[in-house]
Image (cartoon, helix red, strand yellow):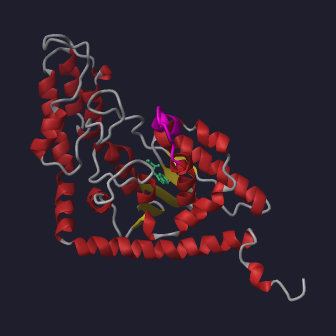
Amino acid sequence: MQQRRVFSGMQPTGEAHLGNYLGALRQWVALQEQAECIFSVVDYHAITVEYDPAELPRRVFDMAVSFLAAGLDPDRCTMFVQSDVPEHTELTWVLNTVAPVGELERMTQYKDKTEGMESIPAGLLNYPILMAADILLYRATHVPVGEDQLQHLELSREVARRWNRQYSGGEPFFPEPQPVMGDAGRIRGLDGQAKMSKSRGNTVGMLDEPEAVWQRVRTAVTDPQRVRRSDPGRPEECNVFALHRYFTPEPELARIDRECRSAGIGCVDCKRMLAEGIAREFAPMRERAAEYRARPERVREILGDGAARCRALARETMQGVRERMGLTAWTEVPAGG
Ligand code: TRP
């Protein structure tokens, strides 16, 4: 197999939720068995929107605990906090000089986030450059991303190409990172519409107790055409059934499909089974989270080791970047002139 290095990042939103798990963490856990993997809690990304500095450390820590709880294994992958490796910002500046503003302005996420804003912080525009720097700093070849980040990843590839052309004689100092798509597609939130997110309140915490999972799942929107319990359901149109696919094994899944169609079971029953499935699947994660929370020094050690390893890799990349850009040899300018 070709030499692969995987990089991905997740924003420090506190404890991970169902969408983080289905859309990313689940896949990361599988990837750590197949390739060299680096995973980051990207706090520099998180400061591009309004936030409370007093709360950020806890959000970072909780996300790191969620990484470990989901099954990322410090013996099988490297995990660290982005701001512990200052080279991320250094490379961001460098890549700023080759990133086309026109393309940054075309990013869907940028347009969504800045809609109606009176004064747009440059950080929102440059956000994808920081993301490119994250990936290129480790010369990663593969990046697991959700659909919503594909556009940003494409920009990373463009930035890598441009820098290589300009400073590396076309030789691929930076590999063009390939997306690794999961099977999750676009997972809709419990509201059946928007992408899952904590701020929208349309998801379930990965570490929630079974009762809390049920309290969330019971609010989930089902097939809008199934108004009465006696109406036949359409599993293919139902977001709750879509979620069942991840948590309910066959032949149970086929049975739910059948009985939903024949109105044998109602939406409440169906949601109850889903909540149970989620709580069951997440039980070992709750346990691991509790273990790590009881030993925060172990979490700090894991992140510290990860940052040390990443700093070493980052320094090496930056040395190569600086050499190729004429940023190192000024000490060798001879006397005279
Ligand atoms: N922008 C990504 C998100 O919001 C997070 C992220 C930051 C990332 N840096 C990355 C993802 C590098 C993949 C690779 O989901």
Taking the magenta stretch, the answer to whether it contains residue 117 is yes
105 or 38: nearer the eye? 105
207 or 261: nearer the eye? 207
Find the residue positioned furthest to the front: 118
What is the x, y in percent for residue 76? 39, 67
Q: Is residue 175 visible?
A: no
In the image: residue 73, left or right of residue 133: left
Tell me where the magenta segment starts and ends, as one range. Answer: 110-121
What is the x, y in percent for residue 149? 49, 43
| Vertical position of residue 266 compared to residue 180: above or below | above
317 or 250: nearer the eye? 317
Find the residue positioned furthest to the right: 337
Find the residue positioned furthest to the left: 211
Q: What residue is drawn where x is 26% and y is 39%?
A: 203
In the image: residue 189, left or right of residue 161: left
Quadrant where the N terminus sits is: bottom right
What is the x, y in percent for residue 120? 51, 42
Q: What residue is drawn where x is 29% and y is 51%?
A: 16
Q: Quadrant of residue 302?
A: bottom left
Q: Is residue 243 visible?
A: yes
Q: Quadrant of residue 171?
A: bottom right
Q: What residue is drawn where x is 22% and y is 56%?
A: 285
| Vertical position of residue 337 compared to residue 302: above or below | below
| Vertical position of residue 236 compared to residue 85: above or below | above
Find the residue positioned furthest to the bottom: 335
In the image: residue 170, left or right of residue 260: right
